[in-house]
Amino acid sequence: MQLSTRHLLGIKELSAKDISTILSTATQFKEVLQRPIKKVPSLRDVTIINLFFENSTRTRISFELAEKRLSADVLNFTASASSVSKGETLLDTVNNILSMKVDMVVMRHSASGAPHFLSQHIPAAIVNAGDGINEHPTQALLDAFSINEKTGKLKGTKVAIIGDIMHSRVALSNIYLLKKVGAEVVVCGPPTLIPKYIGNALNVEVSYNLRETLEWCDVANVLRIQLERQNQVLFSSLREYSLAYGINRQLLDDLKKEIIIMHPGPINRGVELDSDVADSKQSIILQQVENGVAVRMAVLYLLSGRNPARE
Ligand code: CP
């Protein structure tokens, strides 16, 4: 099995076949993760650094666990505790790390395009763990894996992506992926949090009506309001956002069917999701996190020189 790309910079660069290869490989790794001994020797003697220039709980731990389950040697880098604080550039930082014979780089950065820039200057394979407001490809892959696991298909599944579409790399990666595999996509949120170009540019439907969107969809992927990326007032208050676009129990009970609730985390409880929705049996939020390890194992394995198809 082989991917058409040396790096995982974004879903935009993947073909539908690449996505299918990653998801089927992840199925095999998920089976490994159910065993009493959850470790395989696939990446023994491969050294991987997790370069995190921005905070993370799920993605960072999930990548580290995936690497350890594959028997890779793992290094963790936190920008705030490094010589970046003394003014060292991104390229100098990475070239110094690679001179110590590091084979792969997993990278999160607040600047959109940072992993793409790096990929033009270094020989190691790069996996984008989230770049600014651009893409979060492994999140979209684990979301797709989780939808497929729950519904048995991606093609034709009706997925609503709800919330702060404007500032969300999860939204963009999910839209690219879902369109490539033939799912139907509606983005829903306040007009100020949905880019005006999105309908035509990405071939998705846009809705400003939460109730109608929930009545239409099979799956609601609910996003966090990204206050840290907003430098202007785009809605009046979190309270008003919650009243118009927050998902509560009553809203779900009024629907004539049971939809699947997803969220990439971290959740703002009581803003985009009430706790009795986030913790309900309709929610697959923790299954998403569980599946992230298998999906990241698949990505790392397929991009490594250890995948026989690449040697
Ligand atoms: N879903 C996600 O990217 O979460 P973290 O920011 O905690 O990694």
Image (spheres, rainbow, N blue to C red):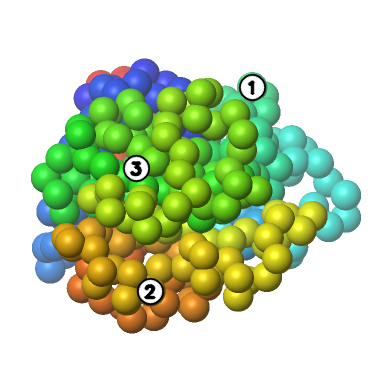
Task: Using residue 108 as the reference point, say whether residue 57 is left or right of it.
Answer: left
Percent x, y for residue 201? 53, 23
Mark 3 or 1 closer to N-term? 1
Asked if one can make out residue 29 in the rendered structure from this viewpoint, the answer is no
Q: Earlier in the sequence, mark 3 or mark 2?
A: 3
Q: Are marks 2 and 1 in contact (CB under 8 Å)?
A: no
Q: Is residue 261 left or right of residue 98?
A: left
Query: Image height check: is 65 above or below 139?
Result: below
- The disc at residue 120 is 1
Nearest the camera: 53 or 272?
272
The residue beneath circle 3 is 141
Could you say whether the residue bearing mark 2 is in a helix, strand or loop? loop
Q: Residue at x 20, y 34 (%)?
A: 156
Could you tell which of marks 2 and 1 lies nearer the N-terminus?
1
Circle 1 sits in a helix, a strand or a loop, which is it? Answer: loop
Residue 191 position in % (x across, y down): 60, 47
Residue at the limit of the structure toward the bottom, as seen here: 276
